[in-house]
Image: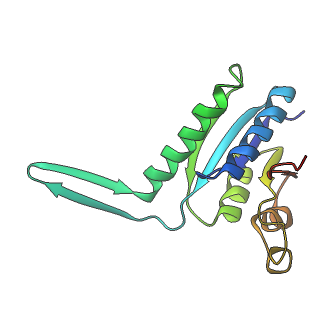
Amino acid sequence: MTSTIITGVDASETAAAAARKAAELASALDATLHLICAYGRYESTTFESGPEKFHYSNEEEALKTAESVARSVRGDFAGLTIRAEAAEGKPGDALVKAAERLRADVIVVGNKRVQGMARMLGSIARDVASQAPCDVYVAYTHERKS
């Protein structure tokens, strides 16, 4: 039984397309969808403006991105349980670690970088597929030509 599906997201259209495909799968299988936004190595800073202090971290920004994608996906998949998360590390590594931690059944990745020269140089999809502790679904995330 498939109960946990994860996918990586960022602010790109291709990530949104992969998230929608992951949501379709999760909805059809009655699974929980985890949207993971990787943020590299943790960085933070605090700004002061008069008496006020503002804290910024790349982890917070990654979480905001994942939450934004989750809100968008929820609009089309109202009954689906979606969790948004930020994860430290490179995208492929962050997805694999999240899959291990969550005991994911499927990782959905887009095929954005599985084109042209990237086939020889590597891609997130290839990195995930070679290390994943579960099935990997490579979603077609480009616009289909008519």
Residue 110 vertical position relative to residue 102 in the rendered view, above or below? below
Q: Residue visible at 34% across and 55% down?
A: 56
Q: Residue visible at 85% across and 80% down?
A: 120
Q: Residue visible at 72% across and 48% down?
A: 7
- Residue 88 in the figure: left or right of residue 25: left
Quadrant in which the N terminus appears: top right
- Residue 128 in the figure: left or right of residue 89: right
Which of the colour schemes (rainbow, by chain, secondary structure, one colour) is used? rainbow
Q: Position of residue 37 (x, y in %)?
A: 59, 52
Q: Position of residue 125 (x, y in %)?
A: 80, 62
Q: Position of residue 33 (x, y in %)?
A: 72, 36
Query: Residue 101: in sight, yes or no?
Result: no
Residue 27 vertical position relative to residue 87 in the rendered view, above or below? above
Q: How many marks?
A: 0
Residue 36 vertical position relative to residue 114 in the rendered view, above or below? above
- Residue 108 in the figure: left or right of residue 14: right
Q: Position of residue 69 (x, y in %)?
A: 60, 40
Q: Residue visible at 58% across and 51% down?
A: 11
